[in-house]
Amino acid sequence: MKRIIRKYGPPIFHCINDFGQGSLAALIPFFIANFGLNYYQSATIIFCNTVVASIAQPILGYVADRWRVPWFIPVGFTVTLVSISAIALATSYEMILTLSLIAGIGAALFHPEAALLVNRTQSHEIGNAMGRFAVGGSAGFALGPLIAGGVYVFGAHFLWVFTAIALLGVLLYLYAFMGEADTANAGESKSSNKSTDTGTNDWASFSKLFFVIASRSILFSVLSIFIPILYITVINGEARASSLALTMYFAMGAVLTYMGGALSDKLGFLKTVRLGNLIFLPSVLVFIFVPNVWGFFGAMIPMAFGVFSQYGPITVLGQKYLAKNAGFASGVTLGLGITLGGLVAPYIGHLADIYDVQTALMTLIPVGLMGLLMSFWLKEPK
């Protein structure tokens, strides 16, 4: 039993952590209705969630390369989920921003060490294991909005369910991993660990990959924020159903993340990334310029493929380009790959305030083009 939990523990913990990350976007209509926020203020909530994480995750990835800090995993997802729960007590916009920022710190703690846990415990099947890990995060983003949608039925205090989920995750982690060999040396230097010293770092290729990571992150973050807003303001849907629309999008993402990993085994990592961007560009045009239910949901599948199919291949590319610093690479690809886009979200929200949501979403077209063009400048790692 413990062996099974150890195998599927990392994706389960990733899912638990991203419950909190995914729920924030679904709560945007709730914040708008209850605190009278505009689009810029709403997107700033996501900005606060991501700004500290974007700075901290590469640093924490470096720490994870040097020392074993397994406690980052349960502490990380606990901080994330308890912060989301505490939003139930928020009485001001500033308090929401603070709690969103603290949740981002939790996510920054979690990702690098969790990715290295996959490497340490399942190195014999690292491709499949990292694919499962990525799918776990996508599943969390899918289930987070579904759970958070309970606030529209039961009120803000329903958010305390996230704390209960965090407690279950901690108990599962303690049962499966505490006292085992890979966690027993927590805090010790890894300088003598051969697995972190083999291979070479291709910093030039990783620098180019960063632009692909940034492109995908912006697409991911902006769509996460504006799918429920577009559903309400343009499609004229109900706020309660907007979280279901986001859940549908992320649920597709969970499946398509796995498909992207499988596809990269056949096509190659870079070809899968290029294919994702090629499919995304026409589908997002339909999504923006066909403002009805058919255009909204019809474009969602290929658009989700374009965003989510790249997640696993980009993660593996980063670890291959920086073979000696897999923790740092994971902090960038897994961490910044989710949070970086949140840094530009307020500016997209500002455009939506000045013009409209559809005009603001047109910024995704040049962003997708940047990711596509930069992917052609990269080479497959050895």
Image (cartoon, rainbow, N blue to C red):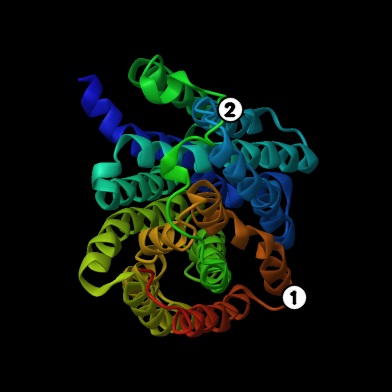
Q: Amino acid at mark 2?
A: Val
Tell me the quadrant of the picture where the N terminus can be found: top left
Residue 126 is left or right of residue 182, and the answer is left
Q: Is residue 91 above or below residue 342?
A: above
Identify residue for label 2: 82
Report x, y in % for residue 114: 45, 38
Nearest to the observer: residue 255 or residue 117: 117
Report x, y in % for residue 292: 41, 76
Report x, y in % for residue 22: 49, 47
- Around disc 2, counting alpha carbons within 10 Å, would you say few (fewer than 14), some (14 to 19), or many (20 or more)? many
Q: Is residue 44 above or below residue 306?
A: above
SS label for mark 2:
helix
Identify residue for label 1: 354
Residue sitting at 46 percent across and 21 percent down?
A: 164
Nearest to the observer: residue 337 or residue 349: 337
Residue sitting at 39 percent across and 48 percent down?
A: 142
- Around disc 1, counting alpha carbons within 10 Å, would you say few (fewer than 14), some (14 to 19), or many (20 or more)? few
Name which of mark 1 and mark 2 comes first in the sequence: 2
Could you tell me if residue 220 is visible in this image? yes
Q: Is residue 313 above or below residue 50?
A: below
Q: What count of labels does the image hold? A: 2
Residue 256: mark:
none
